[in-house]
Amino acid sequence: MLGLTELAGQLRQPARAEHEGEHDEHDDELGALEECQHAPTIRRLHGCYTGAMTTPDSPQPSPPLSPPPVGDVVTSVEQLRSLYRRPSSLVQRKKQTSIDEVCQAVLAACPFVLLATSGSDGSCDVSPRGGPPGFVKVLDDRHVAIPDLNGNNLIDSISNIVTNAHAGLLCVMPGRDETLRVDGPAWVTTSAAVLDRWTDELRRPTTAIVIETAAVFLHCAKSFRRGRVWEPASWDEMVAPDGIDIIRCHLSLDATAAELREQFEHGYAADLAADRPA
């Protein structure tokens, strides 16, 4: 495994512009927003689910702090703590700072995580990340790495990490209610020693996210059980708009739901195929 000293040194070096000037076919999708707003049919729609006419490189202004829309707002940690009972001694001890053999085995089997980041202005983002079991790589007992695979090229999460070097992971195992959480300092890297770890089931990514394990711990099952997440009977009871309904509403598109679904599925298939090694 990559040693802690070597990794730390590499992560603190400025990223090399080894991809500068290269054309990524998926960059073409960034121009699809304008097309989405005016064309009755859409060739490719990935990256079109923002209503703001901005480019990925446009400066993003800090959102103004709005006045609270409700009263009785909690304004201090002390006030907040007074509303809750103290956590048990077991709960207080459950957060670890290193990846043991059990957690390593969980990560080796995990196909899906939720990545939480925050920008320098305090704005937050949660992004789903998936891959073959083991796509989250354990670099050593204090560091994990996640490939940044094909997406919409808004690069919200990795931009947040560049400007505010922290991240959190919620590692989800299909069919299981307990999850594994990993929180800590984070970096975006182009280090070959990290990127070369994805050469079998996935293509070599352009960048990877490395997270140091300031905290590794089990999250209990109650939320998944309250939501009946893994109960097939609850899926049949669900009545909600389709993702296509959301995109048509947000962007006022002329294309039919069937046309959009066909284009989405085509785009998904193309991007997932591009994730596989050549």
Image (cartoon, rainbow, N blue to C red):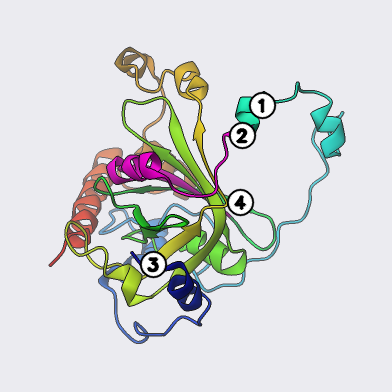
The residue tagged with tag 4: helix, strand or loop? strand
Q: Alpha carbon of mark 4 to alpha carbon of mark 2: how far?
A: 27 Å
Question: Quadrant location of the C terminus?
Answer: bottom left
Above or below for 217 versus 16? above
Closer to the N terminus: mark 3 or mark 2? 3
Front in this rendered view, residue 64 or 33: 64
Are the two marked residues, 3 and 2, in contact with CB atoms closer than 8 angstroms? no
Spatial CA distance of label 2 from label 1 is 6 Å
Q: Secondary structure at mark 3?
A: helix
Can residue 135 be seen here? The reply is yes
Mark 3 and mark 4 lie on one chain; the one further toward the N terminus is 3
* Residue topped by disc 4: 124
Binning the other alpha carbons within 10 Å of mark 3 as few (below 14), some (14 to 19) or many (20 upward) gives some
- Label 3 to label 4: alpha-carbon separation: 22 Å
Alpha carbons under labels 3 and 2: distance apart: 46 Å
**Residue in the picture at 61% in, 51% down:** 124
Label 4, residues with CA under 10 Å away: few <14, some 14-19, many ≥20: few
Q: Earlier in the sequence, mark 4 or mark 1?
A: 1
User: How many other residues sit within 10 Å of disc 2, few (<14), some (14-19) or many (≥20)?
Assistant: few
Q: What amino acid does circle 1 point to?
A: Ser
Q: Which residue is mark 1?
A: 89
The answer to whether the residues at label 4 and label 1 have Cβ atoms under 8 Å apart is: no
Structural distance between the alpha carbons of marks 4 and 1: 30 Å
Taking the magenta stretch, the answer to whether it contains residue 103 is yes
Q: Whole-percent x and y of residue 53?
A: 53, 64
Task: Tell me what residue is drawn at x 50 percent, y 81 percent.
Answer: 13
**Residue under numbered circle 2:** 93
Q: Where does the image place residue 180, in percent across and percent down from the top left? A: 45, 37
Q: What amino acid does circle 2 point to?
A: Arg
Tell me the kind of residue under disc 4.
Cys
